[in-house]
């Protein structure tokens, strides 16, 4: 019998789109995952086990106290009346532990608790907390997609395309720190424990709030747009505090910060598939399109990249965006669409601008 692939299993349960589909929240993706299963016929067992694990775990756990966790655990233990076959139980304990190590779900559903006996659960739970404290979880929003992350403290993060958020499975008592590469919108749960966002600019200290951070490695400027609450930016000699409605701009080359009061829609609308550009260079627009549509751009003349644009796009196809840009400047787009090669690998689309 073929050995069970734990790596395939873990990659599935760590995939946000797979999780939502398996929970019945994204029915439109059914064809995509059925094709995945068909194309990976040797991984059917891992696929089915991942579906089962997703449906057994709660992936939108609210922030709860330790007392509530203990109460729910005890209540579930008291309801436990049956024991599974010892070998089967050990296998499932191993699987559930590996799922929790990837996603760290603080609270299992009652159905999971009742499958296992109290002693095994207490031993595994204690081991999980003890052994996974130093490990980190990384969630990636691939090129062309957006995703939502629920943090261990109940905070919620929206990740834009081509972004990555790294955080511990359990926040320590002395601080909650996450690391961002790319763009994200944060809704941070209020707590006395400090919340910090490390990025390619100054560390952001959060005091229970909503804000957007754009910190792609390839961008020259890191922006922080504050919707409500309070945040500060670490700088030599102290902190620079922002007020709601303000946007900070950190220039990486000069390491300087300036703050302006702006229309925040320009910085927040990406969550709705909308992009607003004001006096933006063609180069900066192309970097956004590259992340959103998974294509490569080539300029026949580098000077074209500095041409300024004022444009708004919302859910247009890439071809429609090209047509709009061609109306605004004397340029042309030659677009070669992406395709699957004979090996089944995806080859990115390419756009030549002249």
Image: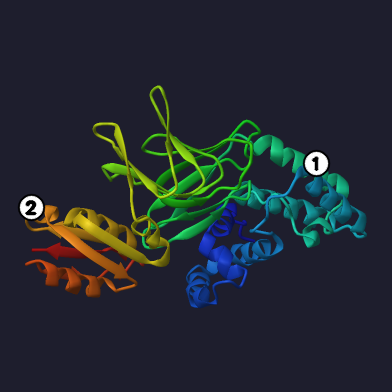
Q: How is the image coloured?
A: rainbow
194 up-or-down from 224: above or below: above
Label 1 residue SS:
helix
Residue that label 2 marks: 303
Dot 2 or dot 1, earlier in sequence: 1
Residue that label 1 marks: 123
In terms of depth relative to the viewer, which is nearer, 96 or 278? 278
Q: Which mark is residue 97?
A: none
In terms of depth relative to the viewer, which is nearer, 338 or 152? 152
| Percent position of residue 245, x then y | 40, 50
**Quarter of the view holding residue 201:** top left
Q: Residue furthest top?
A: 237
Image point 19% across, 56% down: which residue? 279
| Residue 340 seen by the camera | no
From the viewer's perspective, tell me whether residue 77 is left or right of residue 322: right
**Quarter of the view holding residue 335:** bottom left
| Percent position of residue 118, x then y | 87, 48
168 up-or-down from 59: above or below: above
From the viewer's perspective, tell me whether residue 292 is left or right of residue 136: left
| Residue 91 seen by the camera | yes
* Quadrant in which the C terminus is drawn: bottom left
In terms of depth relative to the viewer, which is nearer, 13 or 313? 313
Alpha carbon distance from label 2 to label 1: 64 Å
From the viewer's perspective, tell me whether residue 61 is left or right of residue 242: right
């Amino acid at each position: 019998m073929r050995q069970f692939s734990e790596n395939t299993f873990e990659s599935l349960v760590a995939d946000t789109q797979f999780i939502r589909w398996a929970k019945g929240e994204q029915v439109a993706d059914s064809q995509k995952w059925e094709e995945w299963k068909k194309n990976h016929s040797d991984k059917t067992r891992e696929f089915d086990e991942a579906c089962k694990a997703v449906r057994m775990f709660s992936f939108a756990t609210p922030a709860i106290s330790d007392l509530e966790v203990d109460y729910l655990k005890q209540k579930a233990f008291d309801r436990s009346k049956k024991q599974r076959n010892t070998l089967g139980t050990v296998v499932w304990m191993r699987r559930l532990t590996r799922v929790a190590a990837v996603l760290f779900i603080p609270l299992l559903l009652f159905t999971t608790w009742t499958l296992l006996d109290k002693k095994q659960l207490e031993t595994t739970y204690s081991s999980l907390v003890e052994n996974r404290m130093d490990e980190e979880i990384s969630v990636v929003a691939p090129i062309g997609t957006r995703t939502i992350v629920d943090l261990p403290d109940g905070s919620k993060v929206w990740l834009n395309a081509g972004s990555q958020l790294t955080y511990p499975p359990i926040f320590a008592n002395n601080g909650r720190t996450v690391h961002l590469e790319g763009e994200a919108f944060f809704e941070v749960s209020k707590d006395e424990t400090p919340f910090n966002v490390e990025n390619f600019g100054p560390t952001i200290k959060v005091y229970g709030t909503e804000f957007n951070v754009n910190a792609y490695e390839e961008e020259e400027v890191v922006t922080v747009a504050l919707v409500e609450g309070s945040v500060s930016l670490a700088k030599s000699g102290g902190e620079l505090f922002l007020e709601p409605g303000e946007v900070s701009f950190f220039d990486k080359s000069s390491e300087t910060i300036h703050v302006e009061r702006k229309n925040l829609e320009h910085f927040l609308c990406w969550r709705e598939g909308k992009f607003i550009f004001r006096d933006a260079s063609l180069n900066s627009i192309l970097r956004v399109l590259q992340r959103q549509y998974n294509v490569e751009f080539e300029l026949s003349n580098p000077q074209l990249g500095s041409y300024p644009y004022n444009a708004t796009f919302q859910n247009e196809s890439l071809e429609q965006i090209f047509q709009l840009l061609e109306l605004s400047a004397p340029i042309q787009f030659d677009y070669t669409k992406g395709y699957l090669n004979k090996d089944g690998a995806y080859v990115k689309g390419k756009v030549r601008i002249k």
